[in-house]
Image (cartoon, grey):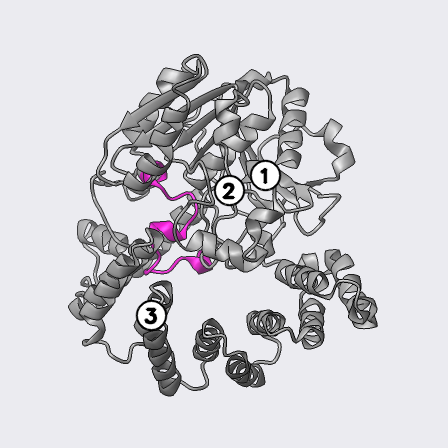
Amino acid sequence: MKRVDVKQIVIDILVDLFMCDSSLIRETTVASDIDGWDSLSHSILLLEISSKFNIEVDEKISFTNVGELIDYLCQILGCVEPVTKKNVKHDEFKKAMIKIKELNTLNQYADVERVILSILDVYPQNLKLNRAYFKVLLKLKKLSQAGKVAMANFALEPESIINLRNCALYYRRMNLFSEALLYLERALIIRPDYIPTLIDKAEILVKADLLEQAIHVVNQIVKLDAANYKAFQIASNIRVKLGDSKYSSESIFKDIDLHLENKVIKSADHKSSFLGYDRYNWHDLNELNPNYGKFMVENPVHPELPYCFFMNDKSENTSRIFVNFCGAINQKARQIPTFARWNWHGILPGKILSVFDSTLFLDKKISLGWYLGVPDMNIMSGIVDIIKKIADNSGVAYENIIMHGSSGGGFSAMRAASLLKGATALVFNPQVNIISYHGSHNDKLHRVYGDAISDLFDSSNFDVTSTIVNGEVAKLIYVQNVQDKFHYNTYFKPLKLALNDSNYLDRVEFIEYDHEYGHAPIPLNIYENVIKKKFS
């Protein structure tokens, strides 16, 4: 067997197991690039590989990416082509970039700077590294140094839109709006219809109180993408600043409203694919009783944010439904909608209903939306209404509905359980308050909703502490790794302390485990023990 054959078989297995597009799987693809590829699914993957190649695969085998998995299999199978030797220098750079990403998610920006400086002498003109250096200098508020790095990057590649936007960002932080706009104008000459640059320009114009110009730019944005929520936020900010002034009645503002009202026309331009989905209107919910497969329910208020699900009814136990909520999704690697743990019918004793977070439709750079949706509509309430209809139509009691998720999905599971009387929340290493969450996930949300995000939604959308303390979640099983220091100290211990004064033992159970992986998917053996003890 040749290496190319092994590669194709591995890709086919990944596509079947994770329901992903084969074109997105490369040898550099890592587990975090594919939604649902966690420790449990990893074990299932190795079983599939063992069966397909008729070999014994060591369950403890570790590999950084798909290419290393293929190399490992080639060694066992004795492929014709020799395994390519690694480029040590490149490997060191790659490890450093992974470390930088990890430290950024923990808000450890001083450590990020230290790692960057340790390899910057070796790669002084590497733009990826220098751009990371620019970002961390902004985080550390070293503006003068950040400006020098931005200008150096611009000198290396003056036609790069990223470099131009970074220069503009530096000047914006310095409140030098005229200089910032000069760089954005240059970027727009290179690519006139690039929406992120137009958004940057509109935001700076608003800050500079050049509101009439800002209205024109927002109008450009919504003509290009009428479903762009950021444009709506900027337009709202302009209205607040304008008040009853003459511009509030200008026809150009009416054009913006018209485009936003017609955003349903543009919603079909999502890079998502609804091929093979069963479709339901909201008024069809009384007939909703899906079997195996994907389905969507149209959103009557915001058609651009449809409700998307995957139902797996292969379990022998049909009296229970596990509702799986997704955590972070890499939209660069995954075509949305995508579904968490939809193929776990061999592990979870009940039907599986996996729920996609439609918040991700708002912006392709969002990786974690916590099912926030939009301010004028509680998307989680709609999801729970659909879950209730499915339960009613299939004869499943609400007490047998398990809202299930880990990390960001765990937070969403607790929110959902608080809205469905009798339901259980089963969560692993979750956030409890997303405003206090670290890293780039919050940064990306602010990109969509603006800096005043906490003023747009009810506080219960961000913090489930009070709903749990007040007994709005009928039953909560909270499983936490003590070596996940951030989640253990920031969420687990404070919630446990907050419940000390209430009689919670009959409705909340805290389970601790100790594993070196930190904030990573729970190991299969620990997970299975929890499931067997609680749902046997």
Q: Residues within 10 Å of mark 3 (few under 14, many from 20)?
A: few
Where residue 70 appears, x then y in whole percent? Answer: 27, 54
Q: Residues within 10 Å of mark 1 (few under 14, many from 20)?
A: many
Give the magenta-colored segment's residue range: 22-42
Residue 26 included in the magenta stretch of the image: yes
Where residue 224 appears, x then y in whole percent? Answer: 68, 70
The residue at the point 83 percent across, 67 percent down is: 249
Q: Is residue 351 above or below residue 78?
A: above
Q: Residues within 10 Å of mark 2 (few under 14, many from 20)?
A: many
**Quadrant position of residue 344:** top left
Report the side of 449 relative to 492 (left or right).
right
Where residue 91 appears, x then y in whole percent? Answer: 21, 64
Residue 39 included in the magenta stretch of the image: yes
Q: Is residue 163 visible?
A: yes
Quadrant the N terminus occupies: bottom left
Report the side of 105 relative to 420 (left or right).
left
Rendered image: mark on residue 142: 3
Amino acid carrying label 2: it is: Phe
Q: Disc 1 and disc 3: Cα gap in Å? A: 45 Å
Where residue 418 appears, x then y in whole percent? Answer: 56, 26
Q: Which residue is mark 1?
A: 309
Q: Which residue is mark 2?
A: 339
2 or 285, nearer to the observer: 285
**Quadrant position of residue 154:** bottom left
Q: Disc 1 and disc 2: Cα gap in Å? A: 7 Å
44 or 355, nearer to the observer: 355
Amino acid carrying label 1: it is: Phe
Mark closer to the chain start, 1 or 3 = 3
